[in-house]
Image (spheres, rainbow, N blue to C red):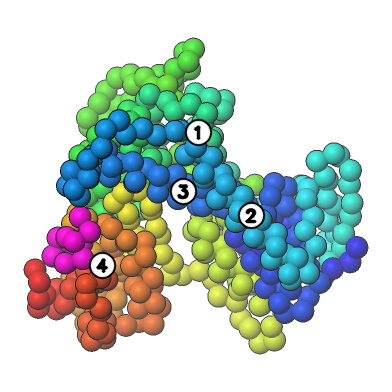
């Protein structure tokens, strides 16, 4: 079969690339080894958010019911039903992607894709049968998978990655999470909310180390209050599986010794999943190396999304998909590379950021001013019972342009979109606070923080 474009991988990079190319009138095939939607939809972003919603509801009912005027006896939960709901959510959305393939007349091919020559892809189905397709252009969008801790290989039961953490048949009584990035802290919140004794171990000085320092400090304070043990600035010196438990030896500022748990979740990052056959040139970290138009070292082959390296986010993968495809098929379009992008972490409190951290501005010698407002100053936050957290905005000292935005608190992941637009359009503090923000809304924390940067916050 001959195509204009073959996309290998059906996740947020792959399916978006396939759909956009089909919209542009191209004959497209999308090859997917698992199911449409990729890791994000089937084993990442979407099912974890379903679990997080359950965790938030249970935590509110079990710890804050009296505050909201509720009382009841014998509150219980069904772990299998909670896991089952998250799987149903994923199945529904995966089916939606498959419908979009049909709608856009995209050939959806199940199997492992291998690039056997420029312009040629061999697909191996689950039953071992093979078929070959040809296309002028091939896009690699095969994503990434959990990276194991070298001395502690995954076994699917006591040592797990994020995929297994979503479908454990039995809730563990105790869990050690190695790594305090977005994946680690989200699962820490989920399992702690249902009563698992959780310890988070992070090698770097703070939780969520890519975030602004104050965000990491605030999250640790909140997690500790919730009962999550946080061991930032700790290194692991030894690991050992002993029967149905795992021992982890740590050294650091708070703890020196052996920790024991029923399950260890390794959340230290991801590694790329490469297609079979001819391999393009890779970076020193093993990701596919790409040029300004997302081209690889193989003629006619392009790479987008997690397989091509950071930022490892679904929304940046979809952005790259559009840029790459339009660069191929829209006359005069010059593809853009990812520069400003929002980072979102969906634990409770939520975390969201875009642009520079204060730490980065200091390192780069950029003069800036800070506007910081706590949610406790916002009426909607008080009314919602969510006064914890703050918004911290960073503006250039000379021109007042937005340089970075960092939010921890209720609805942070929804609030960050405005800041992404402001950063992209180089809006100033004056322009942002001249924009009326509806009352009462959580978005007022942005307005007040902008006013605070110029020294005239009204409500704090």
**Are circles 1 and 4 on residues that touch, CB within 8 Å?**
no
What residue range appears in magenta?
Answer: 373-385
Please tell me how crowded label 1 is: few (under 14), some (14-19), or many (20+) other residues with Cα within 10 Å.
Answer: few
Tell me the distance, in whole angstroms, between the alpha carbons under discs 4 and 2.
32 Å
In magenta segment, residue 382: yes
Marks 3/2 in contact by CB < 8 Å: the verdict is no
Q: Is 451 on the left or on the right of 408, as rendered?
A: left
Contact, mark 4 vs mark 2 (Cβ under 8 Å): no
Q: Which mark is residue 94?
A: 2
Using the image, determine if residue 315 lies above or below residue 458: above
The residue lying furthest to the top in this view is 243
Q: Earlier in the sequence, mark 1 or mark 4?
A: 1
Seen from the viewer's position, the closer of residues 301 and 172 is 172
Instruction: State which tag comes first along the sequence, 3 or 2.
Output: 3
38 to the left or right of 223: right
Question: Foreground: 308 or 126?
Answer: 126
Q: State the SS at label 2.
A: helix
Report the quarter where the N terminus lies.
Answer: bottom right
Estimate the spatial distance between the alpha carbons at disc 1 and disc 3, rounded to whole Å: 13 Å
Q: Which mark is residue 50?
A: 3
Vertical order, 345 against 438 (above or below): above
Viewed as shown, does residue 112 lie left or right of 15? right
Q: Which mark is residue 80?
A: 1
Q: CA distance from mark 1 to mark 4?
A: 34 Å
């Amino acid at each position: 079969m001959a195509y204009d474009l073959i996309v290998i991988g059906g996740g947020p990079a792959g399916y978006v690339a396939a759909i956009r190319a089909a919209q542009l009138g191209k004959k497209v095939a999308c090859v997917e080894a698992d199911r449409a939607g990729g890791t994000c939809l089937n084993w990442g972003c979407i099912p974890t958010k379903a679990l997080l919603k359950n965790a938030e509801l249970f935590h509110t009912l079990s710890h804050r019911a009296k505050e909201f005027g509720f009382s009841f006896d014998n509150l219980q939960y069904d772990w299998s039903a909670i896991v089952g709901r998250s799987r149903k959510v994923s199945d529904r959305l995966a089916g939606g992607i498959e419908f979009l393939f049909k709608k856009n007349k995209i050939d959806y091919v199940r199997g492992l894709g291998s690039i056997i020559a420029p312009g040629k892809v061999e697909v191996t189905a689950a039953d071992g049968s093979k078929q070959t397709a040809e296309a002028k252009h091939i896009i690699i969008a095969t994503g990434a998978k959990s990276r194991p801790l070298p001395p502690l290989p995954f076994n699917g039961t006591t040592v797990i990655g994020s995929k297994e953490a979503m479908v454990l048949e039995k809730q563990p009584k105790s869990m050690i999470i190695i790594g305090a990035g977005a994946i680690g802290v989200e699962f820490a919140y989920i399992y702690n909310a249902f009563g698992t004794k959780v310890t988070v171990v992070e090698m770097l000085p703070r939780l969520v180390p890519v975030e602004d320092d104050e965000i990491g400090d605030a999250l640790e304070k909140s997690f500790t209050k919730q009962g999550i043990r946080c061991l930032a600035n700790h290194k692991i010196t030894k690991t050992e599986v002993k029967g149905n438990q795992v021992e982890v030896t740590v050294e650091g500022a708070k703890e020196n010794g052996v920790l024991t748990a029923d399950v260890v979740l390794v959340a230290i990052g991801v590694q790329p999943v490469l297609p079979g056959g001819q391999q393009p040139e890779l970076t020193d970290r093993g990701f596919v190396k790409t040029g300004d138009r997302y081209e690889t070292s193989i003629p006619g082959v392009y790479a987008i999304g997690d397989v091509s390296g950071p930022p490892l986010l679904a929304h940046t993968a979809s952005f790259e998909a559009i840029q790459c495809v339009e660069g191929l098929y829209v006359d005069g379009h010059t593809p853009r590379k990812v520069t400003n992008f929002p980072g979102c972490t969906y634990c409770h409190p939520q975390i969201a950021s875009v642009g520079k951290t204060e730490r980065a501005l200091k390192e780069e010698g950029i003069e800036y001013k800070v506007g910081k407002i706590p949610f406790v100053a916002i009426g909607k936050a008080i009314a919602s019972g969510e006064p914890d957290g703050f918004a911290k905005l960073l503006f250039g000292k000379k021109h007042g342009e937005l340089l970075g935005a960092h939010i921890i608190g209720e609805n942070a992941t929804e609030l960050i979109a405005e800041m992404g637009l402001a950063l992209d359009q180089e809006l100033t503090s004056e322009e942002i606070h001249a924009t009326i923000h509806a009352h009462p809304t959580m978005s007022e924390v942005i307005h007040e923080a902008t006013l605070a940067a110029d020294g005239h916050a009204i409500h704090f």
